[in-house]
């Protein structure tokens, strides 16, 4: 993922985060990779667009049931094969994080 976000410039950093990698832009986390899944930050302005593209929120199971983290959605599948669109959607995630 680091290579795909490289065109965003030196403002992008990454570090270990909950068993995965967090990606930040000027210190604001906009993406997270856990396992082989990329999650991008969403906000009220972009959530519907992510959902329309088939993205789903990050979730995990607890003893009390499933917890949804609606600030991070899976990156739509088509982004993984389209570096230009990946950058467009990464910028949406950066804006949602800011």
Image: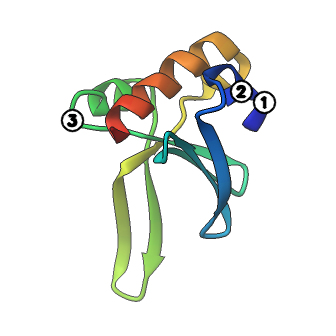
Picture disc at residue 75: none
- The structure's colour scheme is rainbow
> Can you tell which quarter of the image residue 6 is in?
top right
The image shows residue 95 at horizontal and vertical percentages of 36, 29
Marks 3/2: CA distance?
Answer: 26 Å
Of residues 68 and 23, the one nearer the viewer is 23
Pointer 1 with pointer 2, Cβ within 8 A? yes
Residue at position x 42%, y 48% in the image: 72
Instruction: Judge left or right: residue 49 versus residue 18.
Output: left
The image shows residue 20 at horizontal and vertical percentages of 67, 61
Picture disc at residue 6: 2
The image shows residue 80 at horizontal and vertical percentages of 69, 26
Secondary structure beneath dot 2 equals: helix
Residue at position x 36%, y 58% in the image: 69
Query: What is the residue that sits farthest to the right in this orientation?
Result: 3
Marks 1/2: CA distance?
Answer: 5 Å
Q: Quadrant of the N terminus?
A: top right
For residue 62, above or below residue 7: below
């Amino acid at each position: 993922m680091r290579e795909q976000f490289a065109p965003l410039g030196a403002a992008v950093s990454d570090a270990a985060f909950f068993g995965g990698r967090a990606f930040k832009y000027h210190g604001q986390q906009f993406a997270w990779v856990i396992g082989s899944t990329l999650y991008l930050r969403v906000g009220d302005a972009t959530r519907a667009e992510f959902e329309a593209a088939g993205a789903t929120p990050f979730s995990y199971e607890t003893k009390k049931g499933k917890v949804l983290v609606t600030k991070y959605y899976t990156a739509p599948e088509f982004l993984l094969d389209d570096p230009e669109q990946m950058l467009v959607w990464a910028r949406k995630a950066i804006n949602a994080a800011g």
